[in-house]
């Protein structure tokens, strides 16, 4: 596979990209249809930001919805998969910064994690390292994590010398 140019750490791509779909299909939350359908689109309705790295070894998808999703409002981090050697929390933090830059009026990003389907000893550990906090659980026992814009700003200031 040839890397995409320009060589930025994360680059936006369009929903429907076949490489993005291939990475998404390896994510635990990917929906696999019984009749064999494999739709290319994966984000859903509304405004979105789909990011990957030049080597297509990670995928981060954000969606902005006008309606609450499971009672949560803000930017919905719909998918995160890291197959690269980079630290997942670093990728998450950079991607969240790009999402906040895209939607300047948003104050929070939220996501859902299924603790029974993750391989990590601490479900959501990469999200916690990136600044997210476990705020609640859904009725289906999914963990809800949220990141406030001011928390990310504080973490960014702490990293700068």
Image (cartoon, rainbow, N blue to C red):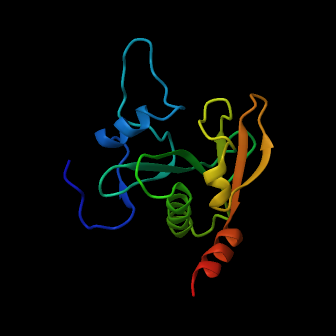
Q: Nearer the viewer, residue 23 or 61?
A: 23
Q: Nearer the viewer, residue 47 or 109?
A: 109
Report the residue at 63% width, 49% height from top: 66
Report the residue at 36% width, 43% height from top: 20
Q: Position of residue 139 (x, y in %)?
A: 79, 30
Relative to 100, 114 lies left or right: right
- Check the image and name the residue furthest to the top: 35
Is residue 36 visible in the rendered image? The answer is yes
Q: Nearer the viewer, residue 38 or 151?
A: 151
**Which quadrant of the rendered structure holds the C terminus?**
bottom right
Q: Quadrant of residue 108?
A: bottom right
Q: Position of residue 160 (x, y in %)?
A: 57, 83
How many labels, in total?
0
Position above or below: 3 against 149 = above
Relative to 39, 90 lies left or right: right
Report the residue at 40% width, 11% height from top: 35
Position above or below: 130 against 115 = below
Report the residue at 60% width, 76% height from top: 156
Q: Position of residue 39 (x, y in %)?
A: 37, 29
Q: Position of residue 143 (x, y in %)?
A: 73, 40
- Check the image and name the residue furthest to the bottom: 161
- Check the image and name the residue furthest to the front: 121
Position above or below: 108 against 56 = below
């Amino acid at each position: 596979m040839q890397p995409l140019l320009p060589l930025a750490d994360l680059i936006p791509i369009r929903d429907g990209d076949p490489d993005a779909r291939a990475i998404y299909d390896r994510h635990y939350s990917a929906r696999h249809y019984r009749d064999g359908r494999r739709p290319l689109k994966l984000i859903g309705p509304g405004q979105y930001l789909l990011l990957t790295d030049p080597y297509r070894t990670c995928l981060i998808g954000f969606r902005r919805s006008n309606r609450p999703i499971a009672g949560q409002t803000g930017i919905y981090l719909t998918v995160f998969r890291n197959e690269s050697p980079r630290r997942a929390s670093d990728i998450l933090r950079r991607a969240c910064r790009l999402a906040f830059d895209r939607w300047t009026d948003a104050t929070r990003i939220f996501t859902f994690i299924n603790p029974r389907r993750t391989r990590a000893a601490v479900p959501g550990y990469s999200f916690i390292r990136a600044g997210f906090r476990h705020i609640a659980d859904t009725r289906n026992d999914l963990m809800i994590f949220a990141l406030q814009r001011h928390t990310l700003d504080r973490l960014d200031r702490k990293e700068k010398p």
